[in-house]
Image: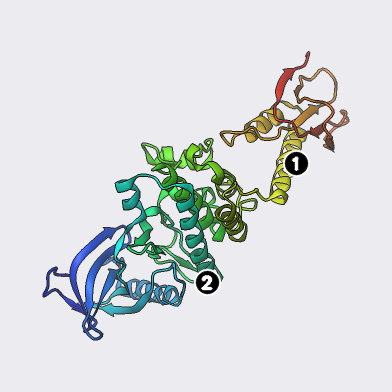
Amino acid sequence: MVTEGAGGRVIAGRYRLQSRLGRGGMGVVWRATDELLGREVAVKALPFDEGLSDAEARRRREGVLREARAVAQLSHPHIVVVHDVVEDDERPYLVMELIHGGSLADRVAAHGPVDTAEAARIGLALLGALRTAHEAGVLHRDVKPSNVLVAEDGRVVLTDFGVARVAGATTLTEAGSFVGSPEYTAPERMSGAGTGPHSDLWSLGALLCAVLSGESPFRRDSLSGIVHAVISEEIRLPARAGPLLPLLRGLLERDPVRRLDAAGAERMLRDFLATGRPPAPPVEGTRHSRRGLLMAVVLAAATAGAGISAAALLIDGLGDDGDTPSPSASVTATSAPSGVPTRTVTTVPSSVPTETVTVTRTPERSTPAPTATATVTSTATATVVPSAT
């Protein structure tokens, strides 16, 4: 058992634990002294389940140490420096630099939300840290304000890789269990679809919303409410984000394939800091996003043999960014034989160039094949008009 105080326990014959700095789901962090070099450090006791069998405990401990050593190889000015990885009394410890300052969460709680320029500065620092980690095959998986430290000199430091995952290795926590903070967790991780660098970028988007407004856009009163908000509810971005709204929309794209990548996010933030103007969203990604939505609508209509579901999907998927209407799509879905109810989504003006895709489903019998025709326009409003049955 660890004892606090000036005469506290010495681990690995070198690091004297003095006072507890914090406790979280991934261990306890202590202020300590490196008695060999005579400097202050932070020591984190990594989680360890004492109820495991000896063989399982040894396997888990080796996995923890292997991944901790991989994280210790990361070198970036905005990633906390890991000095050492040691084991004492069969428990692993990380020895890190001691940051004189508080967490980003504490800063927002004490002084309120930051302005857009400061949010952009924080975002750039964290993007650089994440790119370095990702290039080394390390996923953070718990990017949130309380895991970001702001030093007294303003340096932004990403810390607490306690739930990090190294490509090709077991995780620091029990295999198959969920790790991370739900308010900052990407929807693909919530749904069990896997994780990757794109998942850390979603978390960064939620973090930037939190520092701009004071809380995550997915904060709810219950865990089930948080999960529902992350996976399916309309994302209400903070109005004070102003010129950073295009960036936040890109990072909080639910489809990880269409989500803004680190390079694109860095470009947008640098452009904003250099000009003070809202950064332009990636045009190519927007175009592909709309085409993907169109094809989903067409296939849904062709499968159902009617246009009701297709039109509903399209309306639900457009114009949900919060403050400016998205370009709408006009879909007409029809089915044969005649007499089957249809729904038509129309847009104005009619002079806007359109794109039409027709999908025909092969019938199982001799009845005429249902068809679905979709016409995409680039207007900002949509009206649902029920046709005569």
3D distance between C-alphas at marks 2 and 1: 35 Å
Disc 1 crowd rating (10 Å Cα; few below 14, some 14-19, many 20+) is: some
Looking at this view, name the residue that lies furthest to the bottom: 36
Residue drawn at (52%, 69%), measured in percent from left and top?
Answer: 132
Residue drawn at (21%, 83%), measured in percent from left and top?
Answer: 35
Give the quadrant of the C terminus: top right
Q: Residue 386: where, in percent of width, then height?
A: 73, 17
- On the rendered structure, is 270 left or right of 61? right
Question: Which image quadrant for residue 294?
Answer: top right
Q: Residue 187: where, in percent of width, then height?
A: 52, 47
Q: Amino acid at mark 1?
A: Met
Instruction: Determine whether label 2 and label 1 are within 8 Å by CB.
Output: no
Q: Residue 222: where, in percent of width, then height?
A: 37, 38
The residue indicated by pointer 1 is 295
Give the quadrant of the N terminus: bottom left
Image depth: mark 2 or mark 1 in front: 1
Disc 2 crowd rating (10 Å Cα; few below 14, some 14-19, many 20+) is: few
**Which secondary structure lies at badge 1?**
helix
In the figure, 64 relative to 113: above or below?
Answer: below
The residue indicated by pointer 2 is 168
| Nearer to us in this view, 82 or 221 | 82
| Nearer to us in this view, 233 or 325 | 325
- On the rendered structure, is 68 left or right of 236? left
Question: Which image quadrant for residue 101?
Answer: bottom left
**Which secondary structure lies at badge 2?**
loop
Q: How many marks?
A: 2
Q: Which mark is residue 23?
A: none
Looking at this view, name the residue that lies furthest to the front: 275
In the figure, 75 relative to 233: above or below?
Answer: below
**Looking at the image, is mark 2 or mark 1 earlier in the sequence?**
2
- On the rendered structure, is 315 left or right of 251? right
